[in-house]
Amino acid sequence: MELAVGAVPQGLGCEPEPLVRFAVRSDRWAHTRAEEAEVRRVRTVPRICSTAVSVAFSASMLPAATGLLAHEWLGLALVVLAIAHVVLGWETGMRIARAAVKPHSGGAHMLLVLDFATLVTIVVCACSGLAVSGTVLPALGMVQTNGFFFWDPLHAASAKVLFILVVVHIAVRLRCVAIRFSRKRFTRRKESSHD
C-alpha cells in the first residue's frame, strides 16, 4: 500500500485524535496553552505505560539473565502493566474494531486479529507461568500445581509466540507513529510556507 506524504491508512489506529487538532502557526486550530498541556499529558501516560510494558517484557524474556526470582515477579508486574496498556489504548482499539466491520478494511482486520491473538497469548503465558511458579505462588500463600510437564512446555511455547506477536505489534505501532510524525512535519512545513 503506497501512501502519499501526510496520508493515513484508515482503521489502523493512526488517525489523529479529535482533541489533538492544533497547528503550530495557525489560528484555525489554536488552543490555549492549558489545552495543549492537557493533550500532552493525555498522550504521555499511555506512552510511559507502553515503554514500561516493553522494558518489563524484554527483561522477563531473559530468565537466564535476570534469574528465576526476577523473571517471575517481572512476569506478574507485566500482567498488571499489560492490563493498564489495554485500558489506556481502549479508545484506539475500539476505533480499530469499528473500522474492521466496514468493507475493504483489511488492515483493520489484521490489527484486530493481531491484538486479540496477543491478548490470548498473554493470558496463556501468564496462567501457565503462574502454574509452574516456584517463587510467586508460595509468596502469595498458594500451593504449586502438579502438572509441571504440561504447564512448563505450554509456558515456553506461549512465550515464544508472544515474543513474535509483541515484535509485530510494536512494529505496526511504530509505523503508525512514523506516519503521524511525517504528517505533522508535512503540515507544519506547509503552514509555515503560507506565512
Image: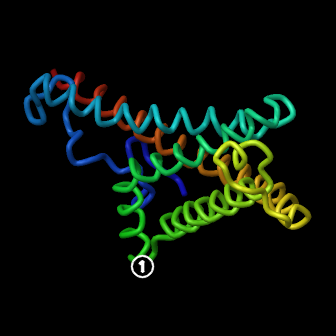
Q: Residue furthest front?
A: 141
Q: Residues within 10 Å of mark 1 (few under 14, many from 20)?
A: few
- For label 1, the SS is loop
Residue 87, horizontal then vertical, whole percent: 40, 52
Vertical order, 34 against 133 (above or below): above
**Closest to the observer: 60 or 13?**
60
**Closest to the observer: 9 or 13?**
13
Q: Is residue 56 left or right of residue 134?
A: left
Residue located 48% across and 45% down the image: 176
Q: Residue furthest right?
A: 149
Quadrant (top left, top right, bottom left, bottom right) of the C terminus? top left
Residue located 45% across and 31% down the image: 48
Q: Is residue 154 left or right of residue 83?
A: right
Vertical order, 167 against 103 (above or below): above
Residue located 31% across and 46% down the image: 16
Vertical order, 42 against 9 (above or below): above
Q: Which residue is mark 1?
A: 103
Say which amino acid is labelled 1.
Pro
Residue 152, horizontal then vertical, whole percent: 85, 58
Residue 61, horizontal then vertical, whole percent: 76, 40
Residue 40, horizontal then vertical, whole percent: 29, 29
